[in-house]
Image: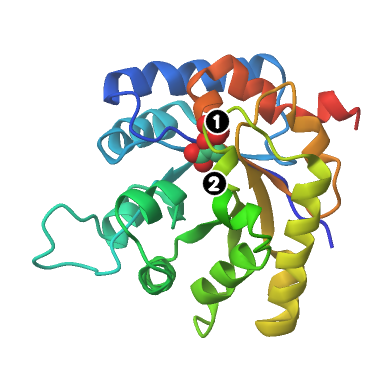
Amino acid sequence: MTRTPLIAGNWKMNLDHQQAIATVQKLAWTLDDADFDYEGVEVVIAPPFTDLRSAQTLIDAEGFKLILAAQDLSDQDHGAYTGDISGEFLAKLNCQYVLIGHSERRMIHNESDQLVHAKVLAAKRHGIVPIVCVGESLEQKNAGQTEVPINQVLEAVKDTGISELVIAYEPVWAIGTGEVATAEQAEETIRGIRESLAEQVDEGLAEKTRILYGGSVKANNVAGFLKMPNIDGVLVGGASLDSEEFANIARFREHIGV
Ligand code: PEP
């Protein structure tokens, strides 16, 4: 089965709504100038919540083929949850994807596997495809706990009946550190995730789920990952804030010569 590669940019808490407009414009124009093949590669951006409406309006008005994601959502739909954002609102802003369980949410906001699971269900209720982020910390890596990302995936998706899913394998020690996993290391973990998904959740889901690598990806190291049979794209943090660099990452086919 062929899985359409997905290149996603997580802006984290960077760029206000005015900067977002300039960044989205520049990204779309850079890709258009290069006759980018949007059918062959999905390009997704995840700006802060306050940028989403501006980005959506611009994308719609200009007919840009960029796809919007949110960086998080509430496990609840509405009510007395001050500061939270409902999947219902995100769906109205044409967010097709939502990041769930990013390591910065797990660490800074103490998000548990149970909450991640509840958020996957919330995304499903609103027809938004979850990008479930998983990965081991440096301590877990040093202790040889290779099962951590696999268990995080299984906890997130078990008993959800989800039919469309993206997973981002992001070793915590590689996020924002400049220390990148080797393509072989990433492929081995991602293959393990796919196999466990097939064995313990659903074979068809495992076959079609895009599994991305994330952690200090740049234009000059993306090709190695995307040559791997089980790696279907990348989740990019810091480098996605620079439209030219992110466009170069999205044009990975030129780096791998296919
Ligand atoms: C991320 O935030 O998901 C990420 C991978 O960050 P960076 O690319 O900056 O390491």
**Alpha carbon separation for disc pair 2 and 1:** 9 Å
How far across and down, in percent of the image, does residue 203 sit?
75, 79
Q: Which residue is mark 1?
A: 177
Q: Nearer the viewer, residue 139 or 207?
A: 139
Image quarter hosting the N terminus: bottom right
Corner quadrant of residue 85: bottom left
Residue 232 visible in the displayed image: yes
Looking at the image, how many numbered discs can be counted on the residues?
Answer: 2
Question: Disc 2 or 1, which lies upstream in sequence?
Answer: 2
Label 2's element?
A: helix
Depicted 127 relative to depicted 229: above or below: below
Disc 2 + disc 1, Cβ < 8 Å: no
Residue 66 visible in the displayed image: no
70 sits left or right of 197 in the view: left
How far across and down, in percent of the image, does residue 170 sit?
59, 48
Q: Residues within 10 Å of mark 1 (few under 14, many from 20)?
A: few
Please name the amino acid that badge 1 sits on. Answer: Thr
Q: Residue at x 61, y 62 (%)?
A: 149
How far across and down, in percent of the image, does residue 193 sit?
70, 66
Q: Residues within 10 Å of mark 2 (few under 14, many from 20)?
A: many
Depicted 44 relative to depicted 33: above or below: below
Q: Nearer the viewer, residue 6 or 28?
A: 6
Q: Is mark 1 within 8 Å of ligand 1?
A: yes
Please name the amino acid that badge 2 sits on. Answer: Val
Label 1's element?
A: loop
The way the protein has been coloured in the rendering is rainbow
**Residue found at the far front of this picture:** 143
Corner quadrant of residue 7: top right
Q: Which residue is mark 2?
A: 172
